[in-house]
Image (cartoon, grey):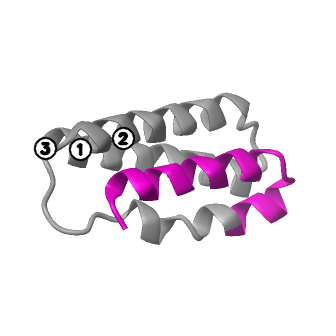
């Protein structure tokens, strides 16, 4: 699967998880790890965007695990994954 396909799946999963209570969202987020991991070398910009997306997803997970508000974190994570997707699509 390509990076852009992985990113699209991650966006869908994030949007679905956002609507769930924390105890349901956390397993969804944990399931995204494999999709966000890189496969092979990519352009530096794509790698950085993927890394940023991964960290943003981790921040959501930490907040949910701690029972903290995550509203703005969801938006940041989705935005980071959308950036990763857009760079992956345009990468050679």
Crowd class of label 2 (few under 14; some 14 to 19; many from 20; radius 10 Å): many
Residue at image mark 1: 46
Which residue is pictured at 76% across the width and 36% down the height?
69
Res. 44 mark: 3
Callout 3 environment at 10 Å: few (<14), some (14 to 19), or many (20+)? few
The first of marks 2 and 3 along the sequence is 3
Query: Magenta-highlighted stretch: main secondary structure?
Result: helix
Residue at 34% x, 56% y: name it. Answer: 3
State how far apart marks 2 and 1 are (Cα). 6 Å
Measured as percent of width and height from the top left, residue 7 is found at 45, 51
Alpha-carbon span between mark 3 and mark 1: 5 Å
Out of 84 and 72, give the one closest to the viewer: 84
Q: Is 6 part of what is drawn in magenta?
A: yes
Q: Which mark is residue 84?
A: 2
Q: Crowding near pointer 1: few (<14 within 10 Å), some, many (20+)?
A: many
**Residue 25's x, y, as percent?**
75, 59
Q: Nearer the viewer, residue 63 or 18?
A: 18
Q: Which residue appears at 57% of the width and 47% of the height?
A: 11
Relative horizontal placement of residue 76, taking residue 90 as reference (left or right): right
Instruction: Give the position of the C terminus as an image quadrant.
Output: top left
Marks 3/1 in contact by CB < 8 Å: the verdict is yes
**Considering the numbered disc 2 on the image, is that residue within a helix, a strand or a loop?**
helix
Q: Name which of mark 2 and mark 1 comes first in the sequence.
A: 1
Asked whether the residues under the numbered discs 2 and 1 touch, taking CB atoms below 8 Å apart as contact, a structural biologist would say yes
Residue 6 location, x and y as percent?
A: 44, 59
Q: Give coordinates of residue 75: x percent, y percent.
A: 62, 31
Question: What is the span of residues highlighted in magenta in the rendered image?
Answer: 1-27
């Amino acid at each position: 699967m390509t990076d852009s396909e992985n990113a699209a799946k991650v966006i869908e999963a994030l949007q679905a998880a956002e609507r769930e209570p924390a105890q349901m969202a956390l397993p969804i987020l944990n399931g995204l790890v494999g999709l966000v991991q890189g496969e092979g070398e990519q352009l530096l910009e794509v790698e950085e965007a993927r890394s940023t997306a991964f960290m943003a997803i981790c921040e959501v997970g930490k907040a949910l695990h701690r029972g903290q508000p995550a509203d703005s974190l969801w938006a940041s994570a989705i935005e980071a994954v959308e950036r990763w997707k857009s760079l992956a699509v345009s990468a050679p």
